Structures are given as C-alpha cells and as structure tokens.
Amino acid sequence: MAKIILEKGREQRILPGHPWVYRTEIARIAGTARPGDIVEVEDWRGKFVGKGFFNSSSMIAVRLLTQKDEEINADFWRQRIEQAWKYRQTVLSEANTDSFRVIFGEADFLPGLIVDKFASCLAVQTLALGIDRVKNLLAEILDEIIKPEAIYERNDAPVRELEGLELRRGFLKGKLEPPLVIISENGLQICVNIAEGQKTGYFLDQRENRAAIRPLVKGARVLDCFCHTGGFSLHAAKYQAREVIGLDISEEAIKMAEHNARLNGLENVCTFKTANVFDALRELDKSKEKFDAVILDPPAFVKSRKALEGAVRGYKEINLRALRILTPGGFLVTCSCSYHMPEELFIKTVISASQDVRRRIRIIERRGQPPDHPWLAGYDESKYLKCLIIQAL
C-alpha cells in the first residue's frame, strides 16, 4: 500500500476530524498510488494518520475512510452501512415519513456516497472515484440490509467530472417504469421522479422545516418561491392556507407540483407558475401584491468561495423583495443550502435587506438540517442548510 506523507503541520486540520487531504498538502508519495487506490496517510514524522481513497486528478487527493489502522474490505463496508442504517432507525423512529437520507457521505464516514430512501426505493450517488469503484459491492450490501424494491444510480452530478468520472444513470437493481415513487411526508403523498428530479429526486433535507410552517400559514395567502415539486406549497395548503402560489423556473418541476397537488386534493388551493423568481418578485412588488407568508428556498447560489460576493447580492435581492410584499405581521421563511454562505453572514444579509426596505423584523427560529443529514464535527462542509423563520412588522 502506497503512503502519502503530509507537509509539516498539515495533519493539524485532519486529526480533529476533517476527512480530506488536499493535493497541496502532500510532501511526497512513497510507493505507487494509482487513482482509486486505498493509501495510508502519515504526518511528516511518519506517524499514522489514516487510510483513504487516492485520486491524483482531484484537488481532494485523499478522502479518508478511517483514522484506524484497519483493513478496508467487504466487512468494513457492511459495518459502515449497518451503522448508518441503525442510526436512522433510532433518530427517525418518530418521524412522520417513509423517506430519508440513509447515507450522508463523509458525515457517515463513507466519503462521496449519498443514499436516499424514497419509500421502497433507493437512489444512490457515488461522487468520488474511490467509492465509485466499489459501487456494485455497496449496492449488494444495501440490498441485503434494507431490501428495497429498486436501487437507482443517480450519477449525473457534474461534480463527478472533477473526479474523472463519467455521468450516468440507471437501475442497479429492479426497475420502475416510469421511474416514479410515491412517498409519504408529514401526512402528504408526494410523487418523486428518481431519474429526472433535482439531486436524487426530491429535497429530503427540508422535511422538518416544511412541517415547521404549520402555525404560520392557517388562513394565509402564501407565496412559495423556488417551489420545485411543491414541498413547501403542499404543506402550506395542508395546514389550511387559503391560497398558495408556487413559482419555479423549471416547467417539469411545475408539472410535478401540479400533479402532487391533485394527488392530495389540494389543487383548489395551490396554483403553480413557471417563472424566473427574481423577475416575478419584482413584478409582484410593482403591482403591489401582498402575502401573509413568503417562502424562499432557492438552489445553491454559492458554488465556491469566489462566488460569495455575487451570491450575497442574490440573497439580499430576493429577501428584500419578499419583505416588500409581506403584510404587517407576516412571516418570511428564508433558506440557504450553500455551505459557502455562513449562517451569520446569511442572517446579516437578511437584516440588511430589511433595513433597506425599512421593515423591522423578528427572527423567531434559526433552523437547519434534520438528523438524517448530521453535521460531523471537524467537517464543516456537512453543515450547509440554513432556514430562518422571521416575522416582518
């Protein structure tokens, strides 16, 4: 097994729990390390740091699997998956859903692996070269432990190209034609397209935040921006909003949102429109429309640190417009799923927007991701979702 020797002092970031070794942190390589190989990592003094997958073509040169000197074999993978499954059975025992994230990559000590459970089906992503090499073995173990009807590979994420991997989709087990699954979430039935929907088909990480709007929307006129397939909209309608308007730029997402409304008998409350949300908010403001609650759940505006300045402007713009169309005492639910947008900066941006429109606001709740998306200490990249519930006075 080849050894990766770190530059002096570089282990100080890794030892507390960060699972990545960057290419620039490597002093030298002892032995032959081919892309996808498992390698040992040592500090500059020759002290063992851990074992992980190596990839010379990625900026993340090593993704650590363990900080113990243990063998990486089928039993290792089985134990890791069993631990992840047992954890979900524990923390979600009272959850009102049949769908959740089974494996959250590095936070479950399985770097680059994402597994989402949608009712009786699994959607799998292997986003790094090393984990992609053992994809079929992992699928076999998932099949044995969870016994899904089907396992679908959603490896069409562009991040795979940074690892030198091709983009691909298809069933690893079973088949659904069409690839649609009906899931249950907080008493709603939601249709998920595991082949075409964003990410793995549906944003499971907002499950608890969608339920949290219940006391805010009864009898309210609600605007759901970036509604995707209707998650927040459907919850608002179920929780007795008098009118819900959902906006999204994707025609396919809007069609699915309309289907989901009909599936739950909420089509008379929900109206969905294909629109650029930035333009739509300006038009609603211009026409002096008012809403009792506005939900902002945009896609990640910040893909890298370099994009942060522009993203701050984007977040400020949509929050400013949302605050302008809120009735006095109305509620704003505003989210960011960008790791590169720190929570304190996100809050500062929303406050700045409120000051520009001269609206006093009260921050009622600071929410985040649910327990099936745990934040691993030492690996801040696993803490990404921010959700603020605000009252505009």
Image (cartoon, grey):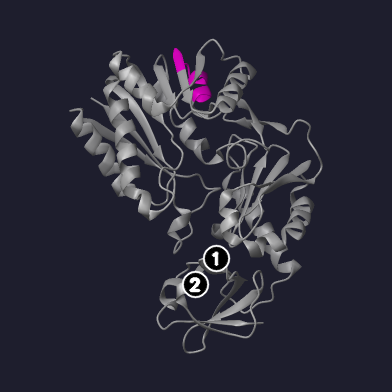
Work out whether residue 80 can be spotted: yes
Marks 2/1: CA–CA distance: 8 Å
The quadrant holding residue 264 is top right
Q: Position of residue 47 (x, y in %)?
A: 51, 86
Q: Is residue 383 magenta?
A: no
Left or right of 156, for residue 59: left
Q: Is residue 305 above or below residue 226?
A: below
How many discs appear?
2
Residue at 32 percent of width and 15 percent of height: 290
Q: Is residue 180 above or below residue 19?
A: above
Q: Position of residue 125 (x, y in %)?
A: 64, 51
**Do the residues bearing badges 2 and 1 touch, measured as CB atoms within 8 Å?**
yes
The secondary structure type at the circle numbered 1 is loop
Q: Is residue 269 above or below residue 354?
A: above
Residue at 58 percent of width and 71 percent of height: 56
Q: Nearer the viewer, residue 71 or 126?
A: 126
Q: Position of residue 218 (x, y in %)?
A: 42, 17
Q: Please give the residue where the numbered disc 2 appears in the rendered image.
A: 23
Q: Is residue 118 above or below residue 357?
A: below
Q: Please give the residue where the numbered disc 1 appears in the rendered image.
A: 58
Residue at 63 percent of width and 39 percent of height: 99
Residue at 49 percent of width and 27 percent of height: 248
Which image quadrant: the C terminus?
top left
- Mark 1 burial class by Cα count in 10 Å: few <14, some 14-19, many 20+: some
- Mark 2 burial class by Cα count in 10 Å: few <14, some 14-19, many 20+: some
Mark 2 belongs to which amino acid?
Answer: Arg
The secondary structure type at the circle numbered 2 is helix
Which image quadrant: the N terminus?
bottom right
Q: Which residues are magenta?
A: 233-244
Q: Nearer the viewer, residue 392 or 11?
A: 11
Mark 1 belongs to which amino acid?
Answer: Ser
Q: Is residue 236 magenta?
A: yes
